[in-house]
Amino acid sequence: DRGRKFLEAKYGPVPFPDYRIAEMPNDIVPWYGDSEPGLIISRNEMMTSEEGLLGNVVHELAHSWWGNKVVPDGPGGYLLNECMASFSGMSFFEATYGRERTIEENEFGSSTGSPDATLYGYMQIWRAGKDVPISQLKSGDGNHYNISQTKGVWVLRMLSDRIGSERFYAALRQLIATHPTLTLPEFRKAMVDAASDDQGLPQFLAQWLDHPGIPVLEAR
């Protein structure tokens, strides 16, 4: 219930009248969780600790808005469902466990999470030459999914920090209310409109959405 209240404060009421959770044996499904309108499916291993349960359920519950109510359309759609769901889970985790632990686990992983969905996992994709811009991510590709879960989440966090959380979430609630389907260009326009005083925001979005890679610092 903590997770539901947290998400409803950000996005508005859950768009479905009720929700059920189904637990699946680990060896039956290859993923950690899945979300359908009114239903969350979770692997056994995610139900054995508070951290795993909260992290998985909040991520899947966030799909009520991002992926189920608002359906992404076109290239870069991963930003509008998987990125949003993981960003929501990250925000809730930080509110529950604190900033330091949240950043550490998003950098290197936790006992209940996949190492692929960490910044360390993203760097393995980048080093292998398989990184692609967020605006070109396509469903069905494992590397694209992991990029959305890693770099994509941090881009949303930087965007929220840049324009301010109040404007960021207000723009998201407006999109939820007006867009049953949503494209990445529509999302970008909504953010630029929400922060019309930020003249550098279009360049920021282009830098982080339309180009692969991240800044690399060399210490000498």
Image (cartoon, grey):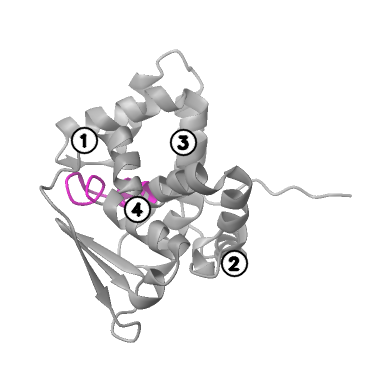
Tag nearer the camera, 2 or 3:
2
Element assignment for label 3:
helix
Point out the frontmost of discs 4 and 3.
4
- Residue nearer the viewer, 160 or 24: 24
Can you say whether 37 is above or below 29 in the image? above
Label whose residue precedes the other's in the sequence (2 or 1): 2
Which region is colored magenta? Answer: 64-84
Looking at the picture, how far across and down is residue 46, in whole percent? 39, 70
Q: Residues within 10 Å of mark 3 (few under 14, many from 20)?
A: few
CB atoms of marks 2 and 1 within 8 Å: no
Which amino acid does the dot numbered 1 rest on? Ile
Spatial separation of the CA atoms under disc 2 and disc 3: 23 Å
Sooner in the amino-acid sequence: mark 2 or mark 3: 2
Q: Where is residue 98? Give x, y as percent.
A: 57, 44
- Amino acid identity at mark 2: Gln
Residue at which label 1 appears: 176
Residue placed under numbered mark 3 in the picture: 206
Q: Residue at position x 41%, y 58% from top?
A: 55
Tell me, for residue 124, which label it has, or none.
2
Foreground: disc 4 or disc 2: 4
Q: Report, in whole angstroms, how far the alpha carbon at label 4 lies from the one at label 2.
A: 27 Å
State the SS at label 1: helix
Tell us which disc is closer to us: 1 or 4. Answer: 4
Outermost residue toward the bottom? Answer: 27
Provide the secondary structure element on which disc 2 rests. helix
Q: Which residue is mark 4?
A: 58
Q: What's the distance in space between the residues labelled 4 and 3, CA to CA?
A: 29 Å
